[in-house]
Amino acid sequence: MAPSHLRPGFGYRRSADQDAPAPVRHPVVVVGAGPTGLSMAIDLALHRVPVVLLDDDNTVSPGSRAVCYAKRTLEVWDRLGVGEAVVARGVGWRNGWVHHRKQLVYEFDLLTEAGHKMPAFTNLQQYLLEEALVARAHEMAGIDLRWRNRVIGLTVAADHVALVVDTPEGPYELQCEWLVAADGAKSFARRQLGLEFVGQTIRDRFLICDVATDADFPNLRQFWFDPPFHRERSVLMHRQADNLWRIDLQLGWYADPAAEQVPERVAMRLRRILGEEANFRVESAEVYTFQCRRLERFVHGRVLFAGDAAHQVSPFGARGANSGVQDADNLGWKLRLVLAGLAPAALLESYNRERVAAADENLRRAEQAAEFIAPRSPMARALRDAALHLAGRFSFARDFVNSGRLSQPTVYAGSPLTTPDHPADRFGGGVLPGAPCMDALVERSGEADWLLRHLGFCFTALVFDATPPSGQVERLAALPVPVRTVVVRVGTAEPAEEACLADTAGLARDRYDAQPGTTYLIRPDQHVAARWRRFDLTAIAAAMARATGSAEAA
Amino acid sequence: MKLDTTPRLADPDAIFTALAHAYCHLDDAQARAFDARLILLLTNHVGDDDVLREAIAIASDGLVPRDRAGDLDAVP
Ligand SMILES: Cc1cc2nc3c(=O)[nH]c(=O)nc-3n(C[C@H](O)[C@H](O)[C@H](O)COP(=O)(O)OP(=O)(O)OC[C@H]3O[C@@H](n4cnc5c(N)ncnc54)[C@H](O)[C@@H]3O)c2cc1C
C-alpha cells in the first residue's frame, strides 16, 4: 500500500509590507488560499492585476474534503494554466452503479461527448488539487502569496479596506482597494461585518472516510440505498488518486459524532463494506453535518465574498469547490475592468446577481438530493423506494433517483449583463446567452487545437464562416473595452487565412447552432454575452456596453 | 387550469373497482408501496409539470392549511 501522503509545508516569509512606515495599499487582497482564493489569485494575476494572497496556515487542506470536479471547473482551471496538471494527477471515471438493498438497480455511463479538451469529471483529493494550484500560484510573479498570515482585523473605509494581519513575527497593517473574502465556511470577514447566513442545516450526519487499499475495486461511483451492510441508510464509494477511496456513510441525525469516529468502530463499518479480508488503512474519518445556506449578498461595499465564505452546500453533487472556482471565474475580469477604470464599480453588482443565482441553484439541487437520500416522511420514503424499485425496469424512474446530481454550470440568463436573443434570429439551440461556451476540437494552421483556448481573458467576437467588413475588426479592437475577433471556418480554412480556426468536422458549428455569419460575443469568463445571426458592429457595441455594466438593460 | 377534470373514462365503475381490488391482499406497508409506484408511473405518463402541480394542489386541499402545503418544516 502506498505510504500516507505528507502535506507540504510552505514557509512563512517576512514581507516588505511588515517594515513599511505606513500601511501599504494594494489593489486587491485575497484572504484564504483554498480552491477559491487560489483560483481567484491566479485569474487576477493573469489579468495583470497584482494580488496579495493571505493564508493563515502553512499547508494545503487537511482531512477529507472535495473529491470531484466537473468539466466547467476543469475548463476554468485550464484557462488558468492548471487544468492539464489537475486532470493528469486525478482519476477519470464515467460509470456508476446504483444499488438498492441487495440489488444492483442500474448502471449508468456518463457517455462523455468527444471533442472536448477536459473530461466530464476528474476525481482528486482536495489537498492534491490545492498542491497543483499552489504550484501554479508560486510560479506567477503577480501573486504575493503569504503563508501564516492570519487576518485578525478588518475595517471598511470609503475608498479602501484596512486589515490587521497576524504572523509568527507579530501583526502588521495592510490596506487594499478591494478585498476578496475567500476565507471559508468560518469566514472571519463575514463575522467581522456581522453578516448572517440564511438557510438550513441538513438534519443528518455523515461519516466521511478516506481509505487507502490495494484491493481491486472497480473504478465506479457506487451508491447504495439501504444496503445489507448499512441498513436503512446510504453509502457512497468513489475513487481518488493513489488508490485512495472516499467512502461516505450516512449515519442519521441522532448518531453520536464522537462515538462514530472511534477507530475501531470506523474499521468495523468499513470491513462490512470492503469485506473481512480487505487490507486497508484509514487515512481520515470524520463525522460531518452539512449546511445549505448562503449570505444574502456576496458584495458588501469593498468586500467581495466568494466560495464557502459566501455559501455552503452539502457535498452530494460536488458543488462546494466547483462553485467557489466559478465565483472566482466570474469575479476576476470584473475586478480587473473596475480597477482599470474601464467599468463602473456597479459592474461588481452583477457578480452578486449572477453568483447568488448560481448559489441558489446549487442549494436547491443539494436540498433535492438530501430529500431523496433521507426522506422526511414515511410516504416520502415509499415514493423514494418506489422510484428505486421501478428504476430497475424503466428508464423514466431512473430520472427520479437522486444520489446527488453532478454539478452543472449556471446559465446567467436573467443577468443584466446578458443580451437575450432577438426572436428574428431564430436560434434553435447552441450555446444560450449567459451559458458558458462549449469546447470543440478544431484546427489551426493544420494542427489540432481547442476552441476554448481561443476564448477568454478578453471579450471575443466569435464569427462563423464570414469575414467581417473591412475595418470593423479594428473598430472592435479599439472599443473602450477591446473586443478581439476570432473567425471559425466550417470545413477547411483557406491556407491564406492563418488567423482562422478550421472547424473541419463541423463540431463547433453544431454546438453553436451556427450558420454563415453567426456571431457570438463572449465574455472574459467564456460565458456568452450575446449572439446574432450576422456580424453587426452596432449590436456588438451595445451588447458590450451592457456586458460591462456601462448601459442600463434595454 | 390545464388539469383535465372532465369525465374521461369509458367505464369508470370498472376502473374504480380495479383500483380498489388492487389493495385487497396488501397490508398497510404494501399498500403504501403500491400507491407510490402507481403515482410515479402515472406522473411520468402525464408528463406535464403544470398539470401535476395543479393535481398536487387539489389533492392537498383540505388536508393541510393552504399556507403549509409543501412546507417542509411542517413535516415532523
Ligand atoms: C466531506 C466533504 C466533501 C466535499 N466534496 C466536494 C466535492 O466533491 N466537490 C466539490 O466541489 N466540493 C466538495 N466539498 C466542498 C469543498 O471542500 C469546499 O467547498 C471548498 O474547500 C471551498 O473552498 P474555499 O476556498 O472557498 O474555502 P476553504 O477551502 O475552506 O479555504 C479557506 C482558506 O482560508 C484560510 N483562512 C481562513 N480564515 C483565515 C484568516 N482569518 N486569515 C487568513 N486565511 C484564512 C483557511 O486556512 C483556508 O485555507 C466537500 C466538502 C466536504 C466537507
Image: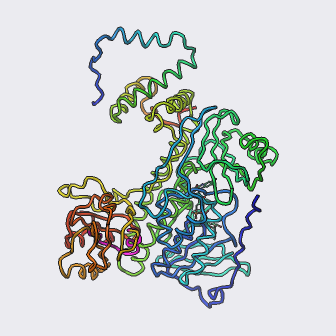
Residue A196, given in percent of the width and then of the height, sits at: 55, 56
Scheme of image coloration: rainbow
Residue at image point 26% right, 80% down: A496
Pick whichever, A429 or A241, lies toward us. Answer: A241
Q: Quadrant of residue A344?
A: bottom left
Residue at image point 49% right, 72% down: A80
Q: Which residue is outermost to the right?
A: A264
| Magenta span includes A499 | no
| Magenta span includes A461 | yes
Q: Quadrant of residue A436?
A: bottom left
- Measured along the vertical axis of the image, is residue A185 above or below residue A60? above
Residue A98, given in percent of the width and then of the height, sits at: 57, 39
Q: Which residues are magenta?
A: A451-463
Residue B13, given in percent of the width and then of the height, sits at: 35, 8
Query: Which quadrant is the N terminus of chain A positioned in?
Result: bottom right
- Measured along the vertical axis of the image, is residue A472 above or below residue A299? below
- Measured along the vertical axis of the image, is residue B18 above or below residue A92? above
Q: Quadrant of residue A459?
A: bottom left
Image mark count: 0
Pick whichever, A124 or A163, lies toward us. Answer: A124
- Measured along the vertical axis of the image, is residue A554 above or below residue A369? below
Pick whichever, A402 or B50, lies toward us. Answer: A402
Residue A392, given in percent of the width and then of the height, sits at: 51, 32
Pick whichever, A521 or A26, lies toward us. Answer: A521
Write down which quadrant ligand 1 falls in: bottom right
Residue at image point 45% right, 69% down: A331
Query: Which quadrant is the C terminus of chain A positioned in?
Result: bottom left
Q: Which residue is outermost to the bottom?
A: A21
